[in-house]
Structure formats: C-alpha cells, structure tokens
Image (cartoon, rainbow, N blue to C red):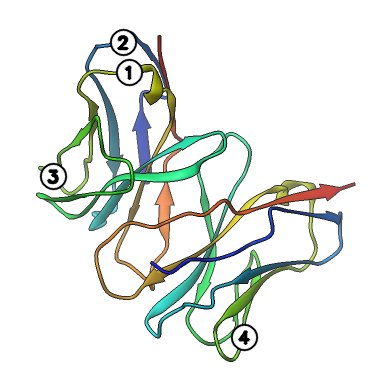
Amino acid sequence: DAKTTQPNSMESNEEEPVHLPCNHSTISGTDYIHWYRQLPSQGPEYVIHGLTSNVNNRMASLAIAEDRKSSTLILHRATLRDAAVYYCILISGGGADGLTFGKGTHLIIQP
Amino acid sequence: DAGITQSPRYKITETGRQVTLMCHQTWSHSYMFWYRQDLGHGLRLIYYSAAADITDKGEVPDGYVVSRSKTENFPLTLESATRSQTSVYFCASSWGRGNTEAFFGQGTRLTVV
C-alpha cells in the first residue's frame, strides 16, 4: 500500500470544525482512501473511506483533491469524545496484503 | 454476540512460555489481521489471512505463528514468549479490501515477565 503523510498532532476547540489533512502523492488509481481513529485504550475504529468523490457519513466528511494526491477528513463539530489518533490509510482495491498504519495525527480537543 | 472478540483481554506470562491469543468474528469476513501496538511504533501488522487456510506474513512476523482452519477464528501463538513481545495486540476483520471497512477487536494486553 502507498504511503501517507499526516501532521503529528493538531489542536482544536470543542464545537468547532476540524480539518485533518493527509498527503498521498504516490496513490495509485485503485487505492481507496480510508480514515480510522483510535480513542485512548481502544482498538481502531473505522471513520470513512472514498475513492474519487467526496463522501459524507454520520461521523465525518471526506474531501478528496481532484488529483487524489491529498485528502482532508472533516469533523463538522468536534466534541471532547473526538479526541483520538486519526489514521489516513490507502488500501488497494485489489491485492491481499494487510492494512498498513502510519503514525497518524493526534487530535487534541480543548473545551 | 455479534462482532469481533479477543480473548483474553489481559495476560501475564513468563519468558519462554507458549501463549495463544484468540480472535473470533461472527460476520464470516474473509480477511483477518493481527497487529501489535507499542509506544513509539504505532500499529504494526504481524500476520494476515485472506481466507481460511490462507495466511501471510506482515511487517513483524518473527516469533509468532498463526492458523486459520475456520473462517471465524484466527488465533495468534507466541511459541516462546520474550519480553520484547510485551505489547497490546489487536485483531481485525473485513469483507474485502479497498471498498470495505475493517472492524477491530478491543485488544489483548500481553505482559511477558
């Protein structure tokens, strides 16, 4: 799976939107962009994924650049419960290898 | 109960002992994965399986053995535990690859003394 680059940490205020960036300049045409998050002392949790078009679900929105070399996870109104490590991962639509996690972005939410 | 469960949640074992961590999922997902998570290293893939009887090595497979005789189970065995294998272990499963989400267990905290 291709590599992603994320900031080590970000800080935001409660009830404000949060934009978490991810760069993936070596993405291939069959790679899906996935986001997972890991709350303290828990296993990772799926957030959202997309291929080319922007995606929305009850947790977040995913904005994908036109050239697909970057994406942004948007939390529309952060709460204290959104404080977690957020991982951006590229997963090939084919193949059979494992999911490769990077270091992720540690999101801190200030009350 | 539906979902993915790991057992035990906590385990303390001695150096040199064999220990098996269990992972069970109720969805009949094709893919299953084992990760370890250590401070400063994030999540690292140990082994994965694309289907029953098909397993393959991940990034850090040394010292671990897996099997997958049934689709729903994917046990991880440390044949002779070492202190460096003290870690939190996560199991995950998914239907497929790119267009499906993966579900993770709650983790097993293993301490080797």
Residue type of the residue flagged with mark 4: Ala
**Horizontally, is A53 left or right of B33 in the view?**
right
Relative to B59, is B66 above or below?
Answer: above
Does label 4 lie on the same chain as label 1?
A: no
Residue B15 circle label: 2
Mark 1 Cα-neighbour bin, 10 Å: few <14, some 14–19, many ≥20? some
Mark 2 Cα-neighbour bin, 10 Å: few <14, some 14–19, many ≥20? some
In the image, what residue occupies the spot 47% across and 37% down?
A: B37
User: Which residue in the structure is indicated by mark 4?
Assistant: A65
Q: Read off the chain for label 4.
A: A
Mark 4 Cα-neighbour bin, 10 Å: few <14, some 14–19, many ≥20? some
SS type, badge 3: loop
User: Which residue in the structure is indicated by mark 1?
Assistant: B82
In the image, what residue occupies the spot 23% across and 40% down?
A: B74
Residue type of the residue flagged with mark 2: Thr
Measured as percent of width and height from the top left, residue A36 is found at 54, 57
Q: Nearer the viewer, mark 4 or mark 3?
A: 4
Measured as percent of width and height from the top left, residue B72 is found at 21, 45
Does label 4 lie on the same chain as label 2?
A: no
Residue type of the residue flagged with mark 1: Thr
Residue type of the residue flagged with mark 3: Lys
